[in-house]
Image (spheres, rainbow, N blue to C red):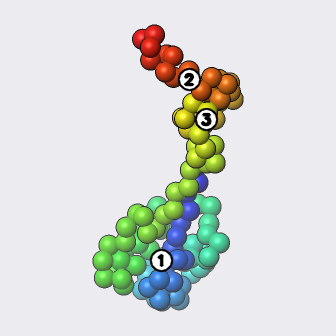
Amino acid sequence: MSVALNLHQLMQAHNISAYRLERELEGQVSRNTIYSVTRAEGIKRVDLATLSKIVDVLSAVIGRPVTASELFTVTPEAHTLRRTAAGTHYTGDRETDEVLNDFPDILERVRRHT
């Protein structure tokens, strides 16, 4: 699963520039950090205390609390999106996935025997 921070998109949707965010934060977060976390290509990690300060300011500027769904995009890994012949999601375990593909009725068989 991958998690992406959507600060850039959120700020664009509300016409908030990184410069304005920097002014509103009044030195609570460094300029370099602000510009780093608000770039369109995103970042790999962020300090939660820093993110909390940024979200507090964005919420105040927008006039309502910023929601987690606005702030983050969660994308499942590709193997969890596809389904086996048995109709289940791929598990990521090669042997299990092979059995589920080779014997599409395996789950029904197991249910009958339990």
Q: Residues within 10 Å of mark 2 (few under 14, many from 20)?
A: few
Residue 20 position within the rendered picture, expressed as x and y whole percent measured from the top left:
48, 89
Q: Which residue is mark 1?
A: 10
- The answer to whether 96 is drawn above or below residue 21 in the figure is above
- The answer to whether 99 is drawn above or below residue 65 in the figure is above
Question: Mark 3, mark 1: which one is toward the viewer?
Answer: 3
Q: Residue at x 61, y 69 (%)?
A: 42
Residue 50 position within the rendered picture, expressed as x and y whole percent measured from the top left:
47, 68
Q: Which mark is residue 84?
A: 3
Q: Residue at x 61, y 44 (%)?
A: 82
Is there a contact, CB below 8 Å, between mark 1 and mark 2? no
Q: Residue at x 44, y 85 (%)?
A: 14
Outermost residue, top direction? 113
Three-letter amino acid code at disc 3? Thr
Q: Residues within 10 Å of mark 1 (few under 14, many from 20)?
A: some
Q: Which residue is mark 2?
A: 105
Residue 94 position within the rendered picture, expressed as x and y whole percent measured from the top left:
69, 29
